[in-house]
């Protein structure tokens, strides 16, 4: 089952024209479950925006709770025709008066974010270079944060190319820069933070991709996901 590069140009996934009985995301779910050696029923698929149309982000996760778990992710960029495949991790609000919904309040004992703070040096120094060799592509590490009242925002993008880290629009970076930024954001209890770790594909590449290859790329990030899921 093939993916379509025109989805990236349109800015959202569109499955209504498919003649297959199941969508590519459902097929990927099955392949991920096989790769993880778990029952398919234990893997859940979510998308944003919620609804049948104009979905630009799709997640696959084991748990039932929004935001708390590190998830496999496929996301079409808002700004460019780019498909990112990898994993996503979120930091929630820690003030109950700020969190509009219970699911947005981070419980450090139950969320995977604290494990990212602890293990980020290992991930950046050891695991991501290995992952880059597996997928044979540069790796991106995107960090975006926002204060609950909208007064504060931050966005940083790092890329790993030939085992050298770069910060976009800045220049060369060190492997210590990423864990330090994660630690600083972790101190802001009234900030929401999104982290996307993955690799990017252009429309002409996506046109040549099938669901098997897509699942293989996602599963290349499985060791990191497994590390962050440990309790």
Image (cartoon, rainbow, N blue to C red):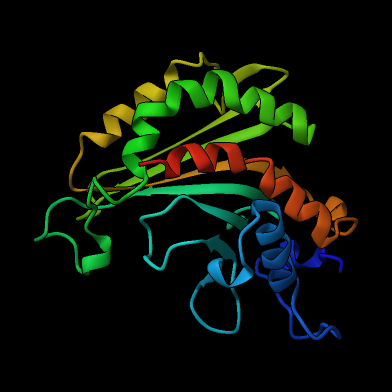
Q: In the image, is 107 to the left or to the right of 117?
A: left
Residue 25 horizontal/vertical position (percent):
69, 69
Name the residue at 86% across, 66% down. 2
Q: Is residue 12 above or below residue 137?
A: below
Place residue 126 in its image quadrant.
Answer: top right
Task: Find residue 3 and report its image quarter.
Answer: bottom right
Side of 102 relative to 68 (left or right): left
Q: Residue furthest right?
A: 208
Percent position (x, y) of residue 139?
65, 33
Residues 143 and 73: in front is 73
**Res 38 → quadrant:** bottom right
View extreme (left): residue: 97
Is residue 170 at all visible to an observer of this figure? no
Q: 114 or 179: nearer the eye?
A: 114
Q: Quadrant of the N terminus?
A: bottom right
* x then y, percent, for residue 61: 52, 60
Q: Quadrant of the C terminus?
A: top left
Q: As rendered, which of 7 and 169 lies closer to the eye?
A: 7
Residue appearing at x 52%, y 70% in the figure: 46
- 108 with respect to 40 (left or right): left
Q: Where is 114 relative to 35, above or below?
A: above
Residue at (41% x, 43% y) in the render: 144
Counting every numbered tag in the picture gives 0
Depth check, front residue: 34 or 20: 34
Q: Is residue 21 visible?
A: yes
Whether residue 211 sits left or right of residue 34 in the image: it is right
Q: Position of residue 4 (x, y in %)?
A: 82, 66
């Amino acid at each position: 089952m093939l993916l379509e590069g025109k989805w990236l140009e349109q800015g959202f996934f569109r499955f209504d024209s498919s003649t297959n009985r199941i969508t590519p995301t459902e097929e990927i779910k099955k392949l991920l479950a096989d790769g993880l050696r778990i029952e398919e029923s234990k893997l859940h698929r979510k998308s944003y925006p919620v609804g049948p149309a104009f979905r630009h982000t799709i997640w696959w996760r084991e748990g039932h709770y929004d935001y708390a778990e590190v998830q496999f992710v496929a996301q079409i960029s808002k700004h460019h025709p780019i498909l990112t495949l990898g994993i996503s991790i979120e930091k929630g609000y820690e003030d109950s008066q700020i969190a509009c919904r219970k699911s947005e309040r981070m419980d450090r004992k139950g969320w995977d974010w604290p494990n990212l703070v602890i293990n980020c040096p290992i991930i950046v120094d050891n695991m991501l270079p290995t992952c880059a060799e597996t997928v044979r592509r540069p790796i991106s590490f995107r960090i975006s944060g926002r204060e609950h009242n909208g007064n504060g925002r931050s966005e940083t993008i790092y890329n790993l190319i030939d085992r050298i880290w770069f910060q976009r629009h800045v220049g060369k970076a060190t492997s210590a820069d990423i864990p330090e930024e994660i630690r600083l954001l972790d101190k802001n209890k009234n900030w929401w933070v999104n982290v996307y770790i993955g690799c990017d594909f252009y429309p002409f590449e996506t046109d040549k991709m099938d669901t098997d290859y897509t699942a293989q790329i996602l599963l290349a990030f499985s060791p990191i996901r497994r590390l962050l899921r440990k309790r």
